[in-house]
Amino acid sequence: MNRFLLICLFSFLVYSCTNTTSQEYTITDITKILDKAEEDLLAYQGIETDSMMKLHMEYFHKAKTFNDSVHLYRAHYYLGEFYQSKGIYKDAMSEYEKALQNISDDADSARYIQTKIAIATTEIELGNKYKAGNILLHIYEVAHRNKRTRQLLNINGNMEILGLELKNYSEAKETFKEAIATIEEEKLIENDATNYVEDYINYHMFLAKAYQAEKELDSALLYIDKGINIADYYNDIEGTAYLFELKGKAYTAKKLFPEAYENLIKAKDIFETLENNKQVSKIIYLLADYHVQKEEYSEALAFLEQMETRYKEKKVLITDYYDVLVLKAAVYKSTKQFEKESIYRQKSADINDSILADGNEETVIQTTTKYEIEKIKNKYEAQHQKDKKRFYIFLSIAIVVVGVFGFLLYRQFNKKRAEVISKLKGADKKEPQNAVKSDKTVDEILQKLKNLEAQEFYLNPKYNLYATAKKIDTNTTYLSSILNSHKKMTFTEYLNNLRIQYTLARLENDKKFRMYTIKAIAKEVGYKSHGSFSRAFKAKTGENPSTYLKKVR
């Protein structure tokens, strides 16, 4: 019955352990699991928000489960990039800060620089130019000191994006051209396409922006087209969308309206597919401006009305909404609706005052996409908590089962042990009687021991109580009893006594023996280790062998 119960408990334990969500993994297994999750995330070519968020959350939870700081850093960093691409800047900043917490104190590391650049670009998109500038200046020194080529290119690029904002067009153009030349001459994309393609596309885009700002539209279009070719070649969908947007603006400025409309619609379609509400709103504003340039004011007002609706739905940056109000006032002025013009000029002034009062600290759009992402994120967080709870339940069950299993094994072992002891005691009680019945007298045993002593049996290390008893045709219990009663010593004491007496006699009579090492003497007289010999020698003589040898040599 006990055996059956043990088998049942063991089977349940195996089942419990195999059904846990977190198993015992080797370091190699963990590395493979985390690397695979990261590869799945980076290799995903789809654009669906829920699929992307699912991959992000799976990667994050695996890194968190295994407490891997490197992969936790990457999980937070990638999530920050994802939020930034969706225009959810507050959450992007939060993820970048969490990424920094998983970097060691080494502020010179490439990861530190990379994360600070990401924070700076977010600040630029938020309109916090001087804050972004201070961050970029700080990390430029770090990257320069550590000779990090890619980071230096990236920092310079972002510095010149700020330069564009501050209208330093000539310097910005030179920097972007140098960056493009460096990537091409050093063949950086051939060696590391993952890290340099996006920069290469962006430098063409920002160089085009600089030319566009200086009204050199043909040069701007030249770099836009080159950027589109690169983005198409490397399948950068988002980069292509931004370049179409820029191309639409350039054609609008050149009054080439069919081309302008075509490119703006292309950009709008891609951004809608990408669910990037921030950029969709910007394209709608550009379409409104396109119609204003064509003096199609009713069409322009229809797009501007869309922007007002989107602002109420929190799909527009407050700074972009300011531009909408200004353009709407201009439309009403052109159509001689002066009362409405006055209303919208006042609205734009109020919004501008609000932006200045906030210090431009919070210009984040809370898009519907954000709420969708939060919903997905919460779903995976809940699943992760459920998995953890399930794991701890199974772990608790496993511990209880192991405890019961161990207790039953212990009980079974004690029962068997008691049976064995009982049998041995019974055997020992019978043996002396058998010995007496076969006329094994004490004198005969003692005589046989004496004969063995004469043969110097004790010098053989293999002789123990059992071997000696067998040699003189008795049992261990009877031999021990005789030694205790007639020689007043245990078998070990008896053996040690014989060996040490032999040693002392030989040291006295054999000059050659006196020159042996302690280890050699111990081996000669039947000891397996010189430590045992030394203890027995001191117990008999009161001196260590080394001290005694000095005296007799």
Image: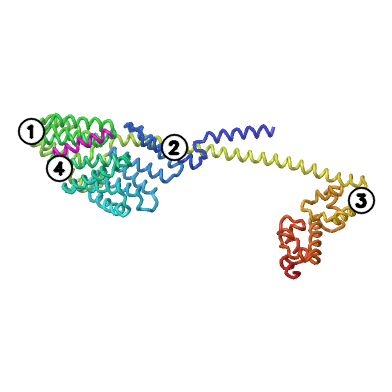
Quadrant position of the C terminus in the picture: bottom right
Q: Which mark is residue 187?
A: none
Which sits earlier in the primary sequence, circle 4 or circle 1? 4
Which sits earlier in the primary sequence, circle 1 or circle 2? 1
Magenta span contains residue 231 = yes
Tell which of 451 and 25 is nearer to you.
Answer: 451
In the image: residue 58, left or right of residue 20: left
Q: Is residue 308 above or below residue 350?
A: above
Write down the quadrant of residue 9 in the picture.
top right
User: Could you tell me how far apart the alpha carbons at marks 4 and 3 are, in whole angstroms?
Assistant: 123 Å
Could you classify mark 3 by the number of other residues whose Cα lies within 10 Å: few (under 14), some (14-19), or many (20 or more)? few
Could you classify mark 4 by the number of other residues whose Cα lies within 10 Å: few (under 14), some (14-19), or many (20 or more)? some
- Pointer 2 residue: 384
Report helix, strand or loop for mark 1. Answer: loop
- Mark 1 vs mark 3, foreground winner is 3
> Is the residue under label 2 in contact with that under label 1 (CB below 8 Å)?
no
Asked if residue 167 can be seen in this view, the reply is: no
Q: Residue 552 location, x and y as percent?
A: 76, 69
Which sits earlier in the primary sequence, circle 3 or circle 2? 2
Residue drawn where x is 17% and y is 44% of the image? 352
Which sits earlier in the primary sequence, circle 1 or circle 3? 1
- Pointer 4 residue: 213
Q: Which residues are magenta?
A: 217-233
User: Could you tell me how far apart the alpha carbons at marks 1 and 3 are, in whole angstroms?
Assistant: 139 Å
Q: State how the image is colored.
A: rainbow
Which sits earlier in the primary sequence, circle 4 or circle 3? 4
Q: Residue furthest left?
A: 336
Magenta span contains residue 445 = no
> Is the residue under label 4 in contact with that under label 2 (CB below 8 Å)?
no
Write down the quadrant of residue 236 in the picture.
top left
Could you classify mark 1 by the number of other residues whose Cα lies within 10 Å: few (under 14), some (14-19), or many (20 or more)? few
